[in-house]
Image (tube, rainbow, N blue to C red):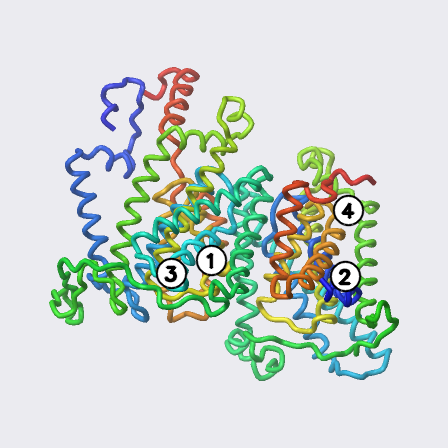
Amino acid sequence: MQNLIDNFFAYTITGLTIGAVYALVALGYTLVYGVLRLINFAHSEVFMYGTFAALWVVMLLGGRPGAGVGQVVFWVAMMFVAAMAMSGFIAVLLERVAYRPLRKRNAPPLIALISAIGASFVLAEIMGLRSRITAWVGLDDNLRDYVRNSRNNAGLPTIISPQPIFTIGGYHVTNVDVFVIVGAIAIMVILDQFVKRSRLGRGIRAVAMDPESAALMGVNRDRVIQVTFLVGGVMAGAAAVFYMLKIGITRYDAGFTLGVKAFTAAVLGGIGNLRGALLGGFILGLAENYGSAIVGSQWKDVVAFVLLILILLFRPTGLLGESLGKARA
Amino acid sequence: MSTTTSTPAARKPASPRFRERVNNLPKAVKILLWVLFAIFLFLLPLLNIPFITTEGSDFGGVLFTVATYVLVALGLNIVVGYAGLLDLGYVGFYAIGAYTIGVLTSEHAHMAWVVVVPIAIVIAMISGIILGAPTLRVRGDYLAIVTLGFGEIVRLTLVNSEWLGGAQGISDIPKPPSFELFEVPSIDWSSGAPVVDLDTTSTFLKFGINDFVPYYWLALGVISLVLLFDILVKSSRVGRAWEATREDEDAAELMGVPTFRFKLLAFALGAAIGGLSGALFATKAGFISPDSFQLLLSILFLAAVVVGGAGNRWGVIVGAIVVSYFPERFREFADFRVLVFGLALMLLAIFRPQGLLPPRRTVRAKRADERQAVLEEGDAHV
């Protein structure tokens, strides 16, 4: 307990940064759940591909520590472009290959989960075997740096060196922390407005509220679902960039634990609810960091899951508990 | 079906399907077939049938693994298939069963194996009730994530708790008592034709460390008991209550089915069988660590049930065999087996969404449908 009081702000800031990543990934779960009533189990892999895209683009552009501001801004911008494009593409591909054929056949919901689990394995393994795959196509000479040690951690060069910007309660808040938290909130505000105000956003809400009526009103359901996956994927891409800037290491199976946590965050806030995902992400990030300060960092994940079970017991629909469809325009 | 000739309303399909042809066999033939099948299963690890037998790893051990998966699938089928509760943390009960054995026979006490196994079952069952009592009121989708969290909590507790051996786990788990009754010879195919090989034998129920075949026999015996239990429960009032709850919870509640209590019962029975399989696993392995109880295992268990056809006990057995046997058989593609497994799951979901052997609707429901059809269409089909 003393540890928590002494380092309260350190735990708070760490919790908020990781919470921001959870929240962005949770949006993907929440959006898809809201529209399809389906746990997109493979969303964690969408995130993982984003981290690799962010990493590779920095490697491609020759990212290194200690470059000028303009250079760094360019690299980070390219990370966003690459990660969002990659994650968005993977998410849409996932929908086409793993979910749409099932929807056409009116498969029971449980089977969609199985398909998602299969897709998740396939995506993670392709990344984990990328050196073998490039060797097959004969590209391993050209791509050696990108596929090397494909089962091990891959690290991003520290292109933004963490500089303390201001000090709060004895903890130096760095530029990376501020960038991650502010950036994530900004992106979530944009998404919230997109869903609230744009035509496509209205389509998403309509399908979430009542798929059949929406179809009768001329909403193209397949298109809406595709857009939903795309938006969720792009959010996961943004999360991947923040994750890489803050943590800096990824691996072919990096998505799994983070995906489970993000899904927990989505449920915590009330699945299907965009603001709930935001709230759930931050609460989960904070709670697991405070909890680990009290009972020891090895219990971090236990704290997260116990919190989830408690919340569901006392508030079974999550904290905000509102569905995507009911969000007011 | 012996009623085919006696009831005029029953319709005769143009070409009797395999299932009906089997059902039409005289009872004595059926019993004989079952006995032959049982003997075949009993001898399977020693027949060394080419192609089926795994080359890289000991076939007895592989068959034992398959058998534990079958057991787990039968347990999870009660939860997922019969009661319709999505459980993603089943590995938690499996771990609890295994660790009960580990703690009580090696780490903190040295109790006899026969005593500990029932304790493991009871503890797993109690943990199922403790988890189920608060969470089964939660909506179905959330149950998945709550149980997933439970599985992780169990694993992380094992990793972090020194009392339970921490990350190193528990070793030196003793073997069950042996009864060396008789030796069973194996078959040698090296000359191209089967030859009985009297030198390589397995002793019936001698639980050693080199020969895993007796463990397979033990597991086979346990599976038969669980299967019998499963058949009895499914066809009892409890089984019907599960079915009603799964199909329409509100309607079942209105008809006077205490749905919550039956869901809890399904959860507890499933947990007990999970604990039993964990106990068997620990017995055979002799060593357990938290690594043996990854979340991935829960997912594989669920995949076994869904691949086979949730709700059909023979289906989930097939599913368990598919999920556990093929990765072992094709070990030469070890690096790619998860990839292939994932692809297989996706293809299966698209082409056999009800599972390999979908559950047959119960006889009563079918009869009701037939009566309905007769009422609506007259005896047009007769």
Task: Identify the image quadrant of the C terminus of chain A.
Answer: top right
Q: Looking at the image, do the residues carrying marks 2 and 1 touch, with CB atoms under 8 Å apart?
A: no
Tell if the residue under mark 1 belongs to the same chain as the one under mark 3.
yes
Residue holding disc 1? B297
Element marked by disc 3: loop
Q: Looking at the image, do the residues carrying marks 2 and 4 touch, with CB atoms under 8 Å apart?
A: no
Q: Looking at the image, do the residues carrying marks 1 and 3 touch, with CB atoms under 8 Å apart?
A: no
Q: How many marks?
A: 4
In the image, taking residue A71 as reference, residue A287 lies left or right, namely left
For badge 2, the amino acid type reads: Leu
Residue A242 at what x, y percent from top left? Answer: 74, 66
Q: Earlier in the sequence, mark 2 or mark 4?
A: 2
Residue holding disc 3? B109
Query: How many angstroms separate mark 1 from mark 3 (CA)?
Result: 28 Å
Query: How many angstroms separate mark 2 from mark 4 (CA)?
Result: 30 Å
Residue holding disc 2? A16
Q: Chain of mark 1?
A: B
Mark 2 is surrounded, within 10 Å at the Cα level, by few (under 14), some (14 to 19) or many (20 or more) other residues, namely: many
Mark 3 is surrounded, within 10 Å at the Cα level, by few (under 14), some (14 to 19) or many (20 or more) other residues, namely: few
Which residue occupies 37% across, 25% down?
A: B364
Tell if the residue under mark 2 belongs to the same chain as the one under mark 3.
no
Q: Earlier in the sequence, mark 1 or mark 3?
A: 3
Q: Chain of mark 4?
A: A
- Nearest the eye: B378 or B120: B120
Discs 2/4, front:
2
In the image, taking residue B274 as reference, residue B208 lies left or right, namely left
Task: Identify the image quadrant of the N terminus of chain A.
Answer: bottom right
Residue holding disc 4? A200
Q: Looking at the image, do the residues carrying marks 2 and 3 touch, with CB atoms under 8 Å apart?
A: no
Discs 2/3, front:
3
